Amino acid sequence: MAAGHGNTPAAWTAVAFAMLGFVVGSVALLQVPTQMTLLWIGIIIAVVAFPLFLVLSRLGFNSSEH
């Protein structure tokens, strides 16, 4: 891999959003009974991570100079 591969603001932001979505979804699954609304919110947050990465990448945040 290239030096600094994935160490960009766009990548870190996308990973943070995906992780937040997984945490919210996990908390929803631990509830008794399962909180389906909270689960879907977590899924939506996790899915938004990829388009967010694409937008930030096109705005120029996909370079290590930031």
Image (cartoon, grey):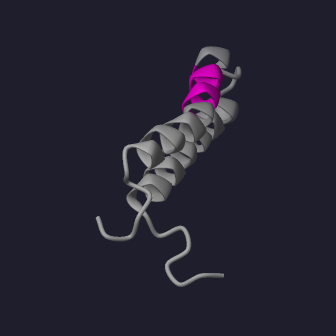
What quarter of the picture does the N terminus occupy? bottom right
Between 4 and 48, which is closer to the camera in this rendering? Answer: 4
- The stretch in magenta equals 38-45
- The residue at 55%/49% (across/down) is 19
> In this rendering, would 59 be left or right of 33?
left
Residue 3 located within the stretch drawn in magenta: no
- The residue at 59%/40% (across/down) is 50
Between 33 and 46, which is closer to the camera in this rendering? Answer: 46
Question: Is residue 31 shown above or below 62?
Answer: above
- The residue at 49%/78% (across/down) is 4
Tell me residue 37's x, y (percent): 61, 15
Tell me residue 51's x, y (percent): 55, 35
What quarter of the picture does the C terminus occupy? bottom left
Question: Is residue 59 shown above or below 44?
Answer: below
Tell me residue 49's x, y (percent): 55, 39
Q: Residue 2 sits in which quadrant?
A: bottom right
Q: Residue 39 sits in which quadrant?
A: top right
